[in-house]
Amino acid sequence: MREYGVTVCSEESGPQRRQTQVNEHVEFTVPGSIQQERKRHVRRGKFQRRVDTKEAADWKTRAAAWALQAMQKAGLKPLDGPLMLEATWYRPKPKSWRKADNLPHKKPDLDNYCKLLNDALNGIVFVDDARIVTAVLAKRFDAQERVEVRVSVITGEEA
């Protein structure tokens, strides 16, 4: 069984990535089944609005709880300034897929995963998801479903 935990770092002189310094960052894992953003339309009289499905809303709550735990452990307030989001979604390989298919190159879409994650972290890990200037996203196969997340404050010429 895999251990899930929280890793939090604050570095004086962080690793270099194209002359970009990473100062503060928070890392955490959201275990369990993953969801993508799916909205349904709700009508009230003449007006219509879009709301999350129950599964998506539950996943947002769970992700927000893990994020809040990581931020509290680090003693950080929501990050502000230019941010880098790194996230990897792991899910089991469907039995119907060929053995040669090693990457999940079909639905669900990666951007739908990202939208839901950004909504869950908004106001907890970062002030606003508009602060994300760089995103490194990936989908992979693994027996344990989870999302591994790292959000970093970046400074330097490319920020």
Image (cartoon, rainbow, N blue to C red):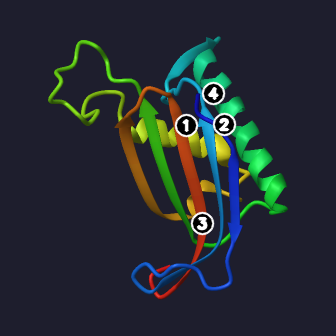
Q: Residue furthest front?
A: 1
Amino acid marked by disc 2: Ala
Identify the mark at residue 152; answer none if there is no mark: 3
Position of 47 compared to 141: left or right?
right
Q: Reading the chain from its start, which is encountered first: label 1 or label 4?
A: 4
Badge 2, how many Cα within 10 Å: few under 14, some, many 20+? many
Q: Nearer the viewer, mark 1 or mark 4?
A: 4
- Dot 1 falls on a residue whose secondary structure is helix
Amino acid marked by disc 4: Trp
Residue 54 spot, x, y in % from top left: 63, 16
- Give the labeled residue for mark 2: 63
The alpha-carbon separation of the residues under discs 2 and 3 comes to: 17 Å
The alpha-carbon separation of the residues under discs 3 and 4 comes to: 22 Å
Q: Nearer the viewer, mark 1 or mark 2?
A: 2
The alpha-carbon separation of the residues under discs 1 and 4 comes to: 9 Å
Q: Nearer the viewer, residue 74 or 156?
A: 74
Image quadrant in which the N terminus is located: top right
Name the residue at 67% across, 77% down.
11
Amino acid marked by disc 1: Leu
Residue 14 spot, x, y in % from top left: 58, 80
The alpha-carbon separation of the residues under discs 1 and 2 comes to: 10 Å
